[in-house]
Amino acid sequence: METGLTVAIDDREFEARLGNIIRQLRPGGQTAGLMRAVGYYMRRQTIKRFDQEVDPEGYDWEPLKESTVLGRMRAGRRAAYRRAGASMGRAIAAKARAEHALSRARKDSTRAKAQARIDRANKRITKAGARQARARGKILHGATGDLRRSINSIADATSAEIGTNLHYAGYHQFGAPRAHIPIRAFLGVADEDAEGIENLALDYLARVMGD
């Protein structure tokens, strides 16, 4: 008498799910939603750079020239900016004197007093810098903030793009030496951005596989 084991595998459900995944990953499937999400995400990241005044690599934009700052300010803000600058100058000088005293101090009590003066000077420097920043306004915002507001994204089933339709945007993105405009890049994909896009893709794939 012969004995044996026969296992029948019905893989129709698996094949159907696999076919659904392949269809949705093809251009024209459901990838348009993923591309839109990528575009929205990159727009948010770009807007954040305007608010933080940094390029895609996280480096600070070159500060505005003093003449540019003062030239676009109204009289009240100009006076506030100059007062903050004078306050910062005094605080920096006080810090330098305290640091000199600290370097020459022999007693612990004298060193503690000098360190306390340095700490107070640092606080004054920070406050004065914040007042100057408020009076100066943000870089690349201008009087209207048009460049920041113009950042937009477009997407189709296979790609997503982020950019602006303002003709002068390239002067800031790439710099314009003849016009004395330094590079202040705002468009680009940083490592943080790439990680965010990867997470969006993984979430999308997980949803597709779960259908």
Image (cartoon, rainbow, N blue to C red):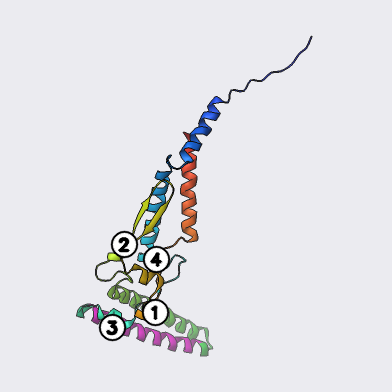
Q: Residue 187 location, x and y as percent? A: 41, 63
- Label 4 to label 3, Cα distance in Å? 29 Å
Asked which quadrant contains residue 153, the reply is: bottom left
- Label 4 to label 2, Cα distance in Å? 14 Å
Q: Nearer the viewer, mark 4 or mark 3?
A: 4
Q: Amino acid at mark 1?
A: Pro
Residue reaching furthest to the right: 1
Q: Nearer the viewer, mark 3 or mark 1?
A: 1
Q: Nearer the viewer, mark 3 or mark 2?
A: 2
Residue depicted at 38% across the width and 50% down the height: 155
Q: Amino acid at mark 2?
A: Asn
Examine the residues drawn in magenta and state their main secondary structure: helix
Q: Amino acid at mark 3?
A: Arg
Q: Which callout, 4 or 2, points at the residue further toward the start of the chain?
A: 2
Q: Residue 14 location, x and y as percent? A: 55, 29
Of helix, strand and loop, which one carries label 2? loop
Residue 8 within the magenta-colored segment of the rendering = no
Asked which quadrant contains residue 132, the reply is: bottom left
Magenta highlight range = 77-102
Location of mark 2 (residue): 165
Between 91 and 13, the residue placed more toward the observer is: 13
Location of mark 3 (residue): 82
